[in-house]
Amino acid sequence: MRRQHLALAVVALAGAAAIPWGMDDYALGVVTIGFYYAVLAASWNLLAGYTGQFSLAQQGFAALGAYATGLSIRDLGVPIWLGILLAAAVSCGMGLALGLLTLRLRAIYLAITTWGFAETVHITLTAGYQVTRGELGLSVPTLLGNLDPLSYYYVFLGLLAVSLAVLYLVCHSRIGQFLRAIRDDELRAASLGIDTTRWKLFVFALSSLLTGLAGACYAHYVAVIGPDMADFSELAKIVVMVVIGGMGTFAGPVLGALLVQLLTSYLGQFGAWDNVLFALVVIVLMRTYREGLVALGRRLWRRLMAWMHPRVEVAARG
Amino acid sequence: MWLAVSPGLLAQFTLAGLMMGVLYALMALGITFIYGVMKTINWAMGEFYMIGSFVQYLIVSHLLGPDLWWLALPATAASVFVLGMLVQRLLLRPMFVGGVERRDEYATVITIALLLLLRSLAAVINGPYQHTPGSHLPDVTLGPLSVPGAEVAAAVVGVLVLGLFFLLLHRTWPGLALRAAAQNRIGVQTAGVDLLRLDMVAFGIGVSLAAVAGGLLAPVYLVYPTNGAVATTKGFEIIVIGGLGSIWGALVGGLLLGLAEALGSALIAPAYQNAYGFLLLILLLLIRPIGLFGERARVV
């Protein structure tokens, strides 16, 4: 791990851990959900940004995780921790299966097929109401037995930190290089001896595991889950978050998720117009500045450095 | 369970499935056609279906009345055609002239944002209400079967529109240019075709096919802000079944999907109607990952 990254991570974590003292319960809830989306965005980024597998099924895995824990607790009577583990296992298994199914598919076919998978999850959750209670929603016991926003804030912060640590280790190891090689040129990667099948499946399994885990925790936080969790608009949100933050960058999805979450909660005051305004913001951003927050940050940082050390800049140019 | 369905009922379901298939094919054709020319997937296709159904509803219920629905349809198609050209000019053209580096990513995000924009705008303007333009067409009896007139009319007009589309593509100069652009975007430019304008036309035609499907199905299904979601699902399923960029694939895929859904509903359970297409799709992918009529991309 590079020292700057470690320092940055410690500062970010300490900052996030300290922030709640200045916030009311509503704001805490907003950021907690932001952490949930950050896990989803980061794990989608592993698939789409790092490996180039433009899958559109992330929201389906979140819903699978949520319903896996909810149903196993209700019908099998397992304890909550086991329910969450089961959820992670189910999502991971389904991710692996979807990965296997779509192994031979490229680009747009992959996108459409994975999207069809997620839609089918959505439809099945809605139509199988005898089991899932459909649109009525499934009640799930809360994780801590209480509704104290502060404790859930730390639970989700911990979840995000663990997920990011795992993703960091993967992305900054040899595996990460394999993944980028697959993204840039799969055929060439294979010809260099990278087992592309294995690593693509690995990425599908890992990203759906993290997403399922997050979905399960989310279910135990909001206490009532519905099929909307697998709705396409959820995925639209995730994609927008990743792209605004910077696709294929490590910090981008997290920044994007938090920013979008804050933006949507701010737009919430406009009532029914919030989605309209949100879509307009995204369209304007895409038309004017589409490289993402991380690229913007880097550029500002370089500008700042050049301003502070003018001579270094000159030397670098020479 | 298999024997619980009488042959007569089965025939009715098959017929209903094929008729629905024609309209699904319209959706899929729009997607595949836009992809063929612009190499872009328009994720907001269902929203143009939705707009089509709303425009048809507004014209029929406020202007012409249900008897003149066939007169409203060209107006619906034309207005959505213009809207589509406008959208393409404002949002998608920068892909080709604005120095966008990752085109697929840009197109995906911008059309997903467009989907969200149009759908939520419709929800704000329309509220939670559902409408129907109504239909005075009498039921049609085919042998022992009786089918709602609006459905038959939709299927028949759907076939006519498909025929018109083929004539346009194969008997006119713009059609020739469009087919050429689908084969080779650079080649068509060297032949002196204004590709940027052609893209606008292609996008307009593609989305107006969706609008025609929306307008035709307005009296069959209800008109409401999210009615495009299911239509998009069908369209994309057909694309994967039939093969992206293939017009025959869209037609055959559409009919197959309609059939699979109708028979699945008849023989298994109607609540999962929208999931049968996906099962068909998975089966097909296991056998042929590029779809029925898709062309294997050459890897260099």
Image: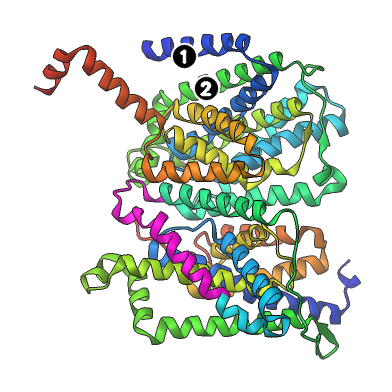
State the residue position of label 1: A9
Chain letter of the residue carrying label 2: A
Q: Residue at x 57, y 8 (%)?
A: A18
Q: Residue at x 60, y 68 (%)?
A: B52
State the residue position of label 2: A164
Q: Residue at x 47, y 65 (%)?
A: B84
Spatial CA distance of label 1 from label 2 is 10 Å
Q: How many marks?
A: 2
- Residue A207 lies within the magenta run: no
- Residue B80 lies within the magenta run: yes
Amino acid identity at mark 2: Leu
Query: Magenta stretch?
Result: B76-104
Task: Determine whether A74 is above or below B83 in the image.
Answer: above
Task: Determine whether B218 is above or below A283 in the image.
Answer: below
Among the 4 quarters of the image, the one containing residue B129? bottom right
Tell me, yes or no, whether the two marked residues, 1 and 2, touch with CB atoms within 8 Å.
yes
Is residue B20 among the parts visible in the rendering? no
- As drawn, which residue projects farthest toward the front? B63
Residue B193, percent across and down?
26, 73
